[in-house]
Amino acid sequence: MIVDAYSHTGLPRFQTVADYRGIMRREGIGKAVLSSFDSSPDLAGIHAAFTEQPEIFRGLGVPLGKDHGEIAAGARAQLAAGFTGLRMTARDVLERPFLLDIVGEAGGVVLAVGRLAEAACAQALHDALQRHEGLTVIGGHFAGGGEPDELEQYPVAGLFAHPRFAVVFSRHGGYPASSIRLWARSIVARAGWSRILWGAEAPLLFWRNETMPAAMAWIDFLEPTADERAAFFGGNAERIYFARPHQPGPLALPFDPWTYINEVPAGLWANGLPVPQEIAGRLVQDWLAAGGEGTLGGHLETVLQRALPKLSKSRG
């Protein structure tokens, strides 16, 4: 069974849970970990997904709030409601280390996104793992990429060697191909196939004009065995996320999460097309409603062909 260890849901920026469930059915994905994001903090939607369909979904919350007390209370409320952990940026790790302790005390998962091969960030995450025996840390998007020799240096080497540190291979098309392949090969050599996971990062892979089959085939250059492939595409995520105790409760946040929405442009393609984030959400939804065939870029071309007037021929 394929388990997507990292995708986003939440309008107006991303996709609804129902949208992604349709993609999962079409692409043969059996389970998914849905991550919130501060630009579209649809915590209620993710909470409903893993409460109503716990056999299919798990959820990661997001730090929100106006100050230390509110951010801490919000994090605890999300964990108490059944979120497996929090998505944290490298900046969160360095500036809000108390969140690592909150998740660690709950025996949860921190999905850390950013350059984890930076010494300060690696040290903070490693120290948190040492403090909390129940904590798991996962580096999102290839742990931010890096140079292979960084994996041999202190304190990065200690983090990547830790048995409760894993890396999700996501954002496959978001890095230069040659460098990220070299980095991925080095991670596998360091962590083995038991500590790497596959993540689609939907719908952002569609923004890059990528397809789900291409994201699944990306790992083929490493020539995994059948057992290694099974671990990478599902077994490891099943163990880390779905095998741990899961008891959803009411989502009783001390604030309205939409009060703290962080609106940022949605960069739809690598060469740059920043648009209001609502347009990104509407575009993906329209593409899926039309059948989700081909690529998001191809659908955008269809939309533009319908909407734009034909070029007028100048008369000289």
Image (cartoon, rainbow, N blue to C red):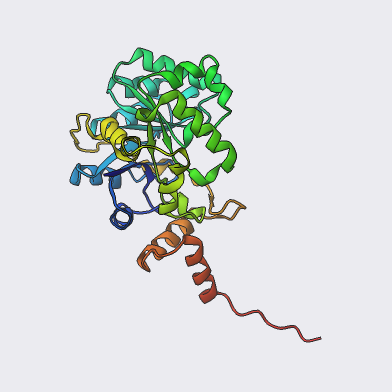
Q: Is residue 15 left or right of residue 276?
A: left
Q: Is residue 228 above or below residue 283?
A: above
Q: Position of residue 118 (x, y in %)?
A: 55, 23
Q: Give the residue at x 37% y 30%.
A: 193
- Foreground of the two, 77 or 174: 174
- Foreground of the two, 79 or 303: 303
Q: Is residue 21 left or right of residue 66?
A: left
Residue at the extreme bottom:
315
Asked if one can make out residue 153 in the rendered structure from this viewpoint, the answer is yes
Total tally of numbered discs in the picture:
0
Q: Is residue 175 above or below residue 309?
A: above
Q: Position of residue 169 (x, y in %)?
A: 44, 38
Q: Position of residue 236 (x, y in %)?
A: 31, 33
Quarter of the image for residue 309 reads: bottom right
Q: Give the residue at x 22% y 29%.
A: 244
Quarter of the image for residue 88 reads: top left
Q: Give the residue at x 34% y 40%.
A: 233
Q: Position of residue 307 (x, y in %)?
A: 53, 74
- Foreground of the two, 134 or 164: 164
